[in-house]
Amino acid sequence: MFDAIVVGARCAGAPTAMLLAHAGYRVLMVDRADFPSDTLSTHLIHQPGVAALARWGLLDRIRDSGCPPLNNAIYEVADVRLEGCARGVEGQRAGYAPRRTVLDAILVDGAVEAGVEFRDKCSVTDLLRDEAGRVVGVVGRYRGVPFTERAHLVIGADGMHSKVAALCDAPFTVHRPRLTCAYYAYWHDVPADLELYEAPSSWVAAVPTNDRATLVLTYFPQSRFDEVRTTNTYHAYLEQVRTTAPALHERLQGKVLAERLRGTGDQQNFFRRSHGPGWALVGDAGHHKDSITARGISDAFFQAECLVRQVSGRLGGDPGLLDAALEAYEQERDAALTPGFQATLAAAQLQQHEQRLELLRAVQTDPDLKAIYFDIVAGIEPISALYVPKLLALL
């Protein structure tokens, strides 16, 4: 019998499994994918997530992969241009955007090295329950062979369309409409910093990653999804870059795509109930928001640490104590992630407001204020942190 079974081995599942193993628990981690493999992602890790990787002893592996540090950020909207670097967290001022084939492999390796038993190409088809209805294990197929495993806790880390969440009938506690659709592609040898460009009904970003590639992302209103995906999608993508970030568009001239254009309109915004008797959810399984602020990976790392901290010492003991710990996890998760959720929904409206532009015009006049603003972008500080006496005087 395992102490925990983690379903999903990417940015939420692998750290959760690894941290549980470090805490002395026997952990099984399964994923239906074959690793290493890619997945739809902005794959930007903001400074809070970078600090987590450093705490786990994995940051040097990201650096050694050749992924460049993102230690200069550029943000342009209307007549405002902000350039600088966040103040950071725990000494980490740079972000990173490793390819998911790189990042997920590093996280899985970290989990296995901690003692986690890992099975890829392994799908969960049902949950085991005891006579009281408590989840006590999983049923599935491992490389085509049926299996059953038991555990004190089953953790769903299997993404926005979580099988574990569906099997547990985990209800939405907050559910907001989709606001954007996103299309992105990788380009060879396009010089870039971490670059963000905003215009009415448009958002464009550039993010350097592994192998001298640059990820260029475009965001459209959700109302344009059917139009963009059914017409000349590549033309719409390039036109969005040209009109929103003309200097970036100029750098793309004469360059070639490293891979095909990808896109999605399934940018859901929700919190789910994160726990029940014998089960819990981490990462996108329990909370998902529009990728426009690229908070998903850092949020997944936070949830992994939060869940493990709450349940440590309670696996295999009194089920009531475990249930109380899981309730505390949900409360901490919601309190920590709700401000970022609200900020993301505001950004995903793809609207400009004169009051906000006036604030940004003041911010761009002062290096300290710009550093605070990039802390806010990274999710280190709430927007209220910007309202220091220096800004109020400028306004």
Image (cartoon, rainbow, N blue to C red):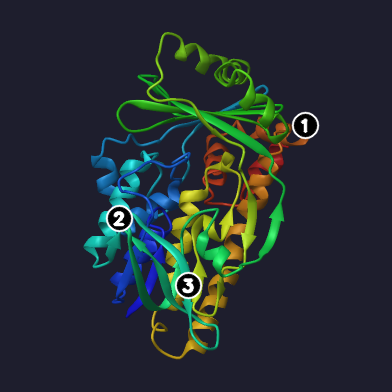
- Indicate the amino acid at tag 3: Leu
Relative to 220, say whether 302 is above or below.
below
x then y, percent, for residue 362 = 66, 33
Q: Residue at x 25, y 47 (%)?
A: 61
Q: Depth check: give the residue in front, 2 or 219.
A: 2
| Whether residue 57 can be seen here | no
The first of marks 3 and 2 along the sequence is 2
SS of the residue at dot 1?
A: helix
The first of marks 2 and 1 along the sequence is 2
x then y, percent, for residue 244 = 62, 20
- Indicate the amino acid at tag 2: Val
| Whether residue 316 can be seen here | yes
Relative to 340, say whether 118 is above or below.
below
Task: Report the residue marked by disc 1.
Answer: 354
Task: Report the residue marked by disc 2.
Answer: 108
x then y, percent, for residue 66 = 27, 35
x then y, percent, for residue 242 = 58, 15
Q: Depth check: give the residue in front, 245 or 6.
A: 6
SS of the residue at dot 2?
A: helix
Please tell me how crowded label 2 is: few (under 14), some (14-19), or many (20+) other residues with Cα within 10 Å: many
Number of marks drawn: 3
Which labelled disc corresponds to residue 127? 3
Q: Residue at x 38, y 48 (%)?
A: 92
Which labelled disc corresponds to residue 182? none
Q: CA distance from mark 1 to mark 3?
A: 52 Å
Determine whether, in the image, residue 272 is placed left or right of residue 37: right
Kindly check if marks 2 and 1 are in contact, taking CB atoms under 8 A apart as contact: no
- Quadrant of the rendering where the N terminus is positioned: bottom left
Q: Residue at x 30, y 70 (%)?
A: 21
Determine whether, in the image, residue 199 is placed left or right of residue 145: right
- Closer to the camera: disc 2 or disc 1? 2
